[in-house]
Image (cartoon, helix red, strand yellow):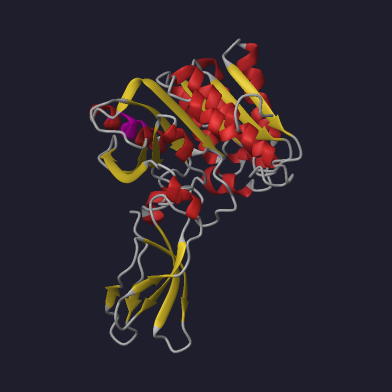
Amino acid sequence: MFDQAIIRVRVDDGHAEKLPGAGLVLSLSASRDGSRLAFRSVEGRGVGDVFVLDLASGRAEKRTNVNPELDGLALGDLKPVRWRSFDGMEIWGLLLTPPGWTPGRRLPLLVYCHGGPNGGVTFGLFPQFIHTVGQVDPYGTEAMASAGYAVLFPMPRGGGGYGEKGQRAIVNSWGEGDYKDILAGVDDLISRGIADPERLGVMGASYGGFMTNWMITQTGRFKAASSAASISDLADQYFLSDGGDVMAEYFRRPWDARESYFAHSPINFAKNVTTPLLILHSEDDLRCPMSQAEQLFVALKKQRKDVKFVRFPDENHELSRSGKPRHRLARFEFILDWFADRLSPRVGALRETIVGGPGTP
């Protein structure tokens, strides 16, 4: 699932062979004479370095060290995991565990739902966005692992990795099979003695935010949740988003499928929510408009649910437009505190390290 190797295919007979190199390879470039290949290779906890492969000898030489600061940090362990879902389908994901963790001790688990929905995760320090590190992952999962959490990155049906059939499996059915795939992964980690069933959290941004909102309307198993740049009303997403036509690809037009739009919108099941929810949203988000967050917040607040709403002015979908890094720092502070208050990992000392000590604005 997570290998992206270099494959050489002969044009005369179609014979294919896998060339030596790291599991995740990006940005291939051949030398003028075709004897060498340059590429970016990404390992489990890095951001990718440039290698040059000599095709005759099979030797790959590392030419860069993009982020040497990582060498001095104790990083978590990121490994592929897989499980069987409700219908027997094999589902894949990544599991990040804290530095120094030894099996046998249950961990608070954060489930990180990816965007898309036809997105996915892979190896790298930013597993959701390794193809463009400039788009910093909304949830600082490596720091969360250092705070004592395990983080599950599920790859449910509808996302990348299962072919066209797998992506079409959620047409007209967001929050159905994909939701069950994720819960099956949680159950698997509990059964293996890794996750503490009493300390479960869920989070995600964009479609991952939709899935987070949806999950807490369908189950009360999670003790805390955080949705960023999220979706709560599918019809509004069609009419107000700069990418609204995506909704028609999955559900047809709202006037032709009113019942389906209603049935798959988290806002219509807000009365079921018992999980404390932290909502984070940018005021100038055109992909998932601010109204998506506002209406969910109002619906929960009017029912006196445990909900907190953080708005970021002058920011876009990726929280990258304003040129104010403090917004990203503030976002992470809100997230860390939210989960720490409800799942109680060892977050105090880590937070002081991240933000520069008590009293840092």
Residue 22 vertical placement versus 262 (above, below)? below
Camera-nearest residue between 276 and 292: 276
- Would residue 231 be seen by someone viewing this image from the given angle? no
The image position of residue 262, as x and y in percent, is: 56, 29
Residue 85: x percent and y percent? 29, 37
Residue at the image point whose x is 38% and y is 41% from the top = 76
Q: Which of 35 and 73 is in front in this view?
A: 73
In the image shown, does 269 or 332 lie closer to the viewer? 332
- First to last magenta residue range: 183-187
The image quadrant of residue 150 is: top left
Kindly give the residue lying farthest to the bottom in the view shown.
Answer: 33
Q: Nearer the viewer, residue 346 or 156?
A: 346
Figure quadrant of residue 277: top right
Majority secondary structure of magenta residues:
helix
Instruction: Give the farthest residue toward the top.
Output: 304
What residue do we see at 32% from left, 75% from top?
Answer: 59
Q: Quadrant of the C terminus?
A: top right
User: Residue at 40% of width from left, 52% of height from top?
Assistant: 123
**Can you give x and y, in whole percent of width and height, for residue 92 in the image?**
33, 45
The reply to whether residue 327 is in sight is yes
Query: In the image, is residue 236 part of the stretch drawn in magenta?
Result: no
Residue 334: x and y in percent read 59, 27
In the rendered structure, the answer to whether residue 211 lies left or right of residue 320 reads left
